[in-house]
Image (cartoon, grey):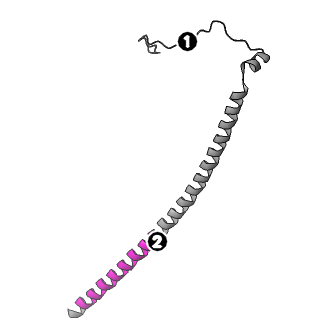
Amino acid sequence: MNTAIIKLRKFEEMFASWAIFAVFISLAILYVYFVNNAVHKIAEREKIEQSISELRSKIGELEFSYIKAQESVTLEYAETLGLIEAQNPKFVSRIDTGVVLTLNN
């Protein structure tokens, strides 16, 4: 009877030690996975920030060329292209009539 209890205790101790070992290994694997994932996300973020910086630079260049082109258009330049100033310009505005058109039958 005592030997059965001793064997049972040894089995429980061995099972507990293997369970602790398995949990430790699992946690170590999860730690490596999450650290690796974080490093990849940081590298990806740096690439995205670089492309954002390049795009902002390009936008600045385009804005500068737009302003420069806007300054070069004058009334005299437009007349040389054959454009004339409208005598009686008419503008369209949106008036809310409260009427709604639908496709329902």
Q: Which sits in the foreground, 92 or 73?
A: 73
Task: Left or right? Give the position of 70 relative to 34.
Answer: right
Task: Left or right? Give the position of 84 relative to 5.
Answer: right
Indicate the position of residue 96 as horizontal and vertical percent values.
44, 13
Task: Left or right? Give the position of 60 relative to 27.
Answer: right
Q: Secondary structure at mark 1?
A: loop
Q: Amino acid at mark 1?
A: Val
The residue sitting at the bottom extreme is 3
Q: Which residues are magenta?
A: 5-31
Above or below, 100 against 39 in this view is above
Above or below, 10 against 72 in this view is below
Indicate the position of residue 69 as horizontal and vertical percent values.
71, 30
| Residue count near mark 1 (Cα–Cα under 10 Å), binned few <14, some 14–19, many ≥20 | few
The residue singled out by tag 2 in the image is 29
Indicate the position of residue 73 as horizontal and vertical percent values.
72, 24
Number of numbered discs overlaid on the protein picture = 2
The residue singled out by tag 1 in the image is 92
Q: Give the Cα separation between the discs numbered 1 and 2.
A: 68 Å
Q: Secondary structure at mark 2?
A: helix
Give residue 24's mark. none
Contact between marks 1 and 2 (CB within 8 A): the answer is no
Q: Amino acid at mark 2?
A: Ile
Which residue appears at 43% of the width and 10% of the height? 97
Comes first in the chain, label 1 or label 2: 2
